[in-house]
Amino acid sequence: MAKKSTATKKPKKTTQKASKKKDKERDSKKSFEQTLWDTADKLRGTVESSEYKHVVLSLIFLKFVSDRFNSRRQEIIDDGKAAYVDMVEFYTMKNVFYLPEDSRWATIAGQAKQDDIAVRIDSALHDVEKNNPSLKGALPDNYFSRMGIDVAKLAALIDSINNIDTIADSEEDVVGRVYEYFLGKFAATEGKGGGEFYTPKCVVNLIAEMIEPYSGKIYDPCCGSGGMFVQSVKFVTSHSGNQKDISIYGQEQTSTTYKLAKMNLAIRGISGNLGEVPADTFFKDQHPDLKADYIMANPPFNLKAWRGPDELTDDPRWSGYEVPPAGNANYGWILHMVSKLSENGVAGFVLANGSMSTSTSGEGAIRKKIIENDLVDCMIALPGQLFYTTQIPVCLWFLTKSKKARKVKGHPELNQRARIRETLFIDARNHGTMVDRTHKELTEADIAEIARTYHAWRGEAKDGDYVDKPGFCKSSTLAEIQANDHVLTPGRYVGAAAIEDDGIPFETKMTDLTTTLYQQMEEAKKLDKAIQKNLEALGYGK
C-alpha cells in the first residue's frame, strides 16, 4: 500500500511544480508587458493620449514584421538560395512581408537617437506598405513627423521595443499578447473615447462561445481594432478547427482605428476584407451583397444624429420594418445586421440596456416586429462596469433566422432542438469579478456557465438537459413576451432566485430581529438627546 501511495503522489508533485513554473512565467510576461507600457506611457507628455497608441502599436508592428522577415531571410540563405534574398516572392509565399533595408527594425533602432528619426520611421512604414499590397491602407501616413514627438522619449521607446523577441516562441503569440494588453490599457487610460475601438476580451469571448463560429463568413459592421475577429480565430483554433474555414468581413469608420484593425489582423496572419477605405457603414456599406453566417458586433452605444431626418428613409435594410429613428442608431444597427444574416445565420452583439424596452420614436414597433418574426434567440443581461466607455450595464442580443432543429457543427452526433417561437433569457448581472476599483470582468467560469446554459437549451450540450433556474435563466414563449409588451429585459422573465432554507425556525428569527430592532431604537433615542443637547449649547435650542 505504501508503494502505491507514493506512486500516486509523484505526478501531483510534478504537476504542482509545472503549475508554479507556468504561473511564474505568466507573471514575468505581465511584468514585461507592464515595463513596456510604462516606457510607452512616458510619451503622453508630448503626444495626445488618443494618438500615442498609434505610435506605440505601429512600432511594435514594425518590430514584428522585421523579426519575421529576418527569420525568413535566414531560411533562404540556409537553403543555399542567397541570390534570392531580395526577391519579394520568396517572402510572400510564406506569408511574410518583404522589407526594404531602410524599413528594417535594425536600421531604425540604429538611428533611434538621430534628430530625424520620426521622418525615418514614417518613410520605413510607407515603404513596407508600398512593397506589400495586402497592407494597403493599414499603416500610419506621415504620422510620426506630424506628432512632434520628443526624440529622447521616442528613442527610449524604440530601445524598449528592441528587447522584444516577437517570434522566439512559435507556440506563444508574444506580439499578439502585447497588442491585446496595450489595446486594453489604452482603452482604460482614454476612458470614454478610448473604449470606442476596444471591446473587453471577456465579452468578445462570451459572444464567440455562444455563436461558435467554426466555419463560414464572419462579419462585424463596426469592427474597431478587430478584437471580434481575433477571438473568433482563437475560438476556431482552440477547438481544433481550421482557420481557413472562416472568412472575415468588416468595416470601420475612423481612419486611425481602421489602420489599427488591419495591423491587428496582419500580425496574426489573419486575412480579412475590411473594405477598401474606412467608411460609415450606414452611408457607404462596403459589403452590400454580403450574407454572413456569423455577425459579432459592439456598435457605439446610443449613437445620436447618425442620419439626417430625411436621409436613408427608403433604405432596403429597413424593408418590412419602420425606419429607425434619427436620434438613436441602436435599431439602425439591429436592422442592418438582420439584413446581413444568411438563411441560417446567427448574430451576437452588444447594446445598451435601453434597447430591450424602449418604445421611443417607433423603436418599440421595430422590436415587436423582430420578435413576431421569431428572430430573437437569446437575451443576456450583463453586469455593469465591464466597459471602459461606460459604467452602465449592457446586454447581449442573439438573433437568428432559423430556430429549426439541425445538426450541430463539430458534433454530428448532436441535433439542435427546435425552439420555434421561444426565447432564452439569461440574467448574468450578478456574475463577474472586480479586477480593479472601477472595472469588472466575466471569469472563464462565468462564460462557461452562460454558454453551457444556452447550448443546453439549444440541445447542443453533452453534459445535461436545460432546466429553468429562477433568478438566472428562463425559456419563454412568444405568448409570454407578448404579455410583457414585447419587452426583452431578462429580469422580467427569470424571476427571483430561490432563497435557501438556513434551518432556523421563523419564530427564532423573528425574536432575534425584534430584539435587535428595539436595541437600535433605544440607541436612536440616546443619539437624539445628544444632538439636541449639542444644539442647545450652540444656542439653537427650542
Image (cartoon, rainbow, N blue to C red):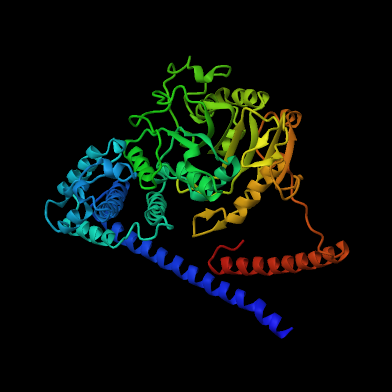
Nearer to me, 360 or 235: 235
Q: Quadrant of residue 412?
A: top right
Q: Where, quadrant-wise, is the C terminus in this rendering?
A: bottom right
Residue 451 is situated, as x and y percent measured from the top left of the image, at 63, 46
* Left or right: where 397 falls relative to 139: right
Nearer to me, 433 or 181: 181
Residue 118 is situated, as x and y percent measured from the top left of the image, at 17, 49
At horizontal 48% and vertical 17% (from top left) the residue drawn is 315
| Residue at the left extreme of this rendering | 115
| Residue at the bottom extreme of this rendering | 2
Q: Reply above or below: 276 against 447.
A: above
Residue 389 is situated, as x and y percent measured from the top left of the image, at 45, 45
* Left or right: where 98 falls relative to 538: left
| Residue at the top extreme of this rendering | 314
Nearer to me, 245 or 539: 245
Q: Quadrant of residue 501?
A: bottom right
At horizontal 67% and vertical 43% (from top left) the residue drawn is 455
Residue 299 in view in this figure: no
Q: How many numbered badges does the structure rendering display?
A: 0
Residue 24 in view in this figure: yes
* Left or right: where 351 falls relative to 107: right
At horizontal 78% and vertical 55% (from top left) the residue drawn is 499
Residue 402 is situated, as x and y percent measured from the top left of the image, at 65, 28
